[in-house]
Image (cartoon, rainbow, N blue to C red):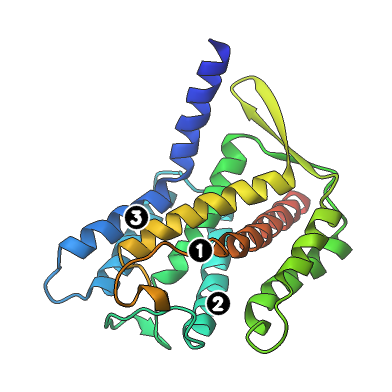
Amino acid sequence: MKIMKDLFYFAYHQSLSCIFPVVIFITLALSKAINIPGLSRYDSILVICLIAQFLMYKFKFETKDEMKVILLFHIIGLVLEIYKVNFNSWAYPEEAMSKVFGVPLYSGFMYASVASYICQAWRRFNLKMYCWPRNDWTIPLGLMIYGNFFTHHFIYDFRWVLTSLLFIVFARTYVKFTVRKTTYKMPIILSFFLIGFFIWIAENIATFFGAWQYPNQAVSWNLVHFSKISSWFLLVVISIMVVAQLKQLYRNM
C-alpha cells in the first residue's frame, strides 16, 4: 500500500511539473484544428506561451529564480534553433510575423518547458546531487557538448566521445529524491537517459502536430529517428548542469 501511495504521489507531482510542456502540446494540437482570424498559427502559439508563462509565475507554480533559468534556456534554445534551421536540419514551413531568421519565437519556449520541468521536479521532490564532479570538469564538458551541436556540421561529430566522457565524469554521481517521506536514489546518468527518452517521445508528438518538420517528414509524418535520443540525452545533461550551477550560485548569494 505504501508503494502505491508513493507511486500516486510521484505521478501526481510529475504531472504538475509538466504543466508548461502539456500546455504547449495542447496548444499545438488545437492550433492545428482552430484558426484565429488575423493571426498566424505560429504567432498564436507564441501568444499562448507568453500568457501561460505569466500565469505560471503569477500563481506561484514558478519562482522568480526559476523564471531566470527558464529565460536563459529560452535564449539558448532559440540560438540553437536559428543555427539548425539555417543548416536545414529541420524547418518551420508556415508563415508568421514572429519568425526570426526562419525560426518562430515560440520555439524557444519548447526548450524553456524542459527547464520548467527540471526546476519544478527539483523543488517538488527535493532533489539532492551527491558526488557531483568539480566545476573544472563539468563546465568545460557542458560547453563542449553544446558546441558539438554547432560544429558537427563542419567537423567530426563527437557526441559518442562526449557521451563516453559523461559516463566517466559522472560515474559516481547519483541523485536522491523524496516521495512523501521516503527518499530514493538513482544514478544521475540513468536520470539523464530517462528524461531524454521522454523528451524524444514528446518530440514525436510535437512533430505530429506540426511544431516543426524534419526533412523526412516533408511529405508525411514519420517517427523521429532513434538517434535523436542521444541528442536529447546530451541536451538534458547541459540542462541539469546549468540548473545545478545556478542553484549553487543562488545559495551562495
Q: How far across and how far down the image is residue 16, in percent?
A: 44, 39
- Residue 45: image quadrant is bottom left
| Residue lying at 51% horizontally and 68% vertically, measured from the top left | 74
| Residue lying at 63% horizontally and 81% vertically, measured from the top left | 150
Looking at the image, tell me whether mark 1 or mark 2 is earlier in sequence order: 2
Is the residue 25 above or below the residue 143 in the image? above
Q: Which element carries disc 1, helix, strand or loop?
A: helix
Q: Which residue is mark 3?
A: 25
Q: Which residue is mark 2?
A: 80
| Residue lying at 69% horizontally and 28% vertically, measured from the top left | 184
Can residue 50 be seen from the camera position used here? no
Q: Quadrant of the C terminus?
A: bottom right
Task: Give left or right: position of 3 versus 86.
Answer: right
Task: Give left or right: position of 197 versus 105.
Answer: right
Can residue 181 be seen from the camera position used here? yes
Is the residue 223 above or below the residue 176 in the image? below
Are the residues flagged by discs 1 and 2 in contact, CB closer than 8 Å?
Answer: yes
